């Protein structure tokens, strides 16, 4: 069963929200687009070329670094001094054809009061490509990426504080939306309302229980459209 919100409030009042903070991948587009399969393959290829490993060993190291360092890229930076810009340029050179444009989502985002910001462990360039493909770029006032985070990936709490300082976010008047439940922990601790977009991937639920989740949006597009139309959104 989805959890009740800790404060007992069972809806989000859009008029009370100044800032909407959205993760990018598998959040602002459906996980079924499976862009990560392409990114995953390209990460493996990068590691194979860098370290002279076969595909199996490269995959094992990729997952090990993800678990230990928060992102594979951070692990490669810490353990091998990899240039993060070169890594991101390689892994994000993917085909966005599986991502469908969504005029309905674009309209819902525009109708919701308050700023919309992307907070991603990826790059600005990747985010801009995805937002443009989705047809929702005009709804967003900024992208806070892994470079702005000084390469500290979510859920390290420091980038959340830096983002709030940079954009003047009042956490009590902000909502954060994420497909990885552990990445909502710092947002909840700061006082934001949290929305989890679950996927079938192991890492979507990994690393935390659901006590810090206020709302679960199985279909984020439908959830936001209903919210924009003034419908009560219950957890």
Image (cartoon, grey):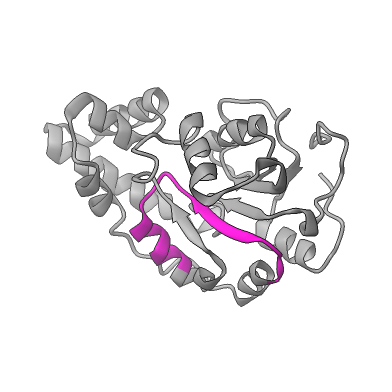
In the rendered view, does 11 fall on the left or right side of 147?
right
Residue 224 on image: x %, y % = 71, 61
> Is residue 127 part of the magenta span, yes or no?
yes
Quarter of the image for residue 71 reads top left
Of residues 196 and 50, the one drawn nearer to the viewer in this rendering: 196
Residue occupying the point 63% across, 44% down: 198
Residue occupying the point 70% across, 50% down: 218
Residue occupying the point 73% across, 54% down: 17
Establish if 231 lies above or below 165.
below
Marks counted in the figure total 0
The residue stretch that appears in magenta: 111-131
Residue 96 on image: x %, y % = 40, 66
Quadrant (top left/top right/bottom left/bottom right) for the C terminus? top right
Residue occupying the point 60% across, 47% down: 169
In the rendered view, does 126 fall on the left or right side of 232?
left
In the rendered view, does 84 fall on the left or right side of 210?
left
Residue 102 on image: x %, y % = 58, 73
Quarter of the image for residue 78 reads top left
Of residues 95 and 213, the one drawn nearer to the viewer in this rendering: 213
Quadrant (top left/top right/bottom left/bottom right) for the N terminus? top right
Of residues 78 and 68, the one drawn nearer to the viewer in this rendering: 78
Q: Is residue 214 visible?
A: yes
Q: Is residue 197 visible?
A: no
Establish if 190 lies above or below 124.
above
Establish if 107 lies above or below 173.
below
Residue 37 on image: x %, y % = 39, 50
> Is residue 118 part of the magenta span, yes or no?
yes
Establish if 154 lies above or below 23.
above
């Amino acid at each position: 069963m989805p959890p009740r919100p800790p404060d007992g409030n069972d809806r989000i009042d859009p008029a009370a929200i100044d800032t909407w903070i959205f993760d990018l991948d598998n959040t602002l587009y459906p996980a079924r687009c499976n862009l990560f399969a392409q990114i995953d393959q390209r990460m493996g290829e990068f590691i194979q070329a860098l370290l002279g490993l076969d595909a199996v060993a490269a995959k094992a190291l990729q997952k090990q670094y993800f678990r230990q360092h928060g992102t594979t890229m951070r692990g490669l930076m810490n353990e091998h001094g990899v240039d993060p810009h070169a890594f991101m340029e390689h892994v994000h050179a993917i085909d966005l054809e599986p991502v469908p444009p969504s005029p309905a989502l674009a309209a819902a985002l525009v109708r919701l009061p308050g700023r919309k910001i992307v907070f991603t462990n990826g790059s600005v360039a990747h985010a801009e490509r995805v937002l443009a493909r989705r047809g929702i770029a005009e709804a967003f006032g900024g992208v806070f990426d892994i470079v702005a985070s000084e390469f500290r990936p979510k859920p390290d709490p420091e980038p959340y504080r830096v983002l709030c300082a940079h954009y003047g976010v009042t956490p009590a008047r902000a909502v954060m939306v994420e497909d990885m439940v552990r990445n909502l922990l710092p947002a909840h601790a700061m006082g934001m309302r949290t929305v989890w977009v679950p996927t079938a991937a192991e890492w979507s639920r990994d690393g935390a229980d659901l006590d810090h989740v206020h709302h679960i949006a199985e279909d984020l597009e439908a959830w936001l459209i209903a919210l924009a139309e003034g419908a009560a959104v219950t957890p």
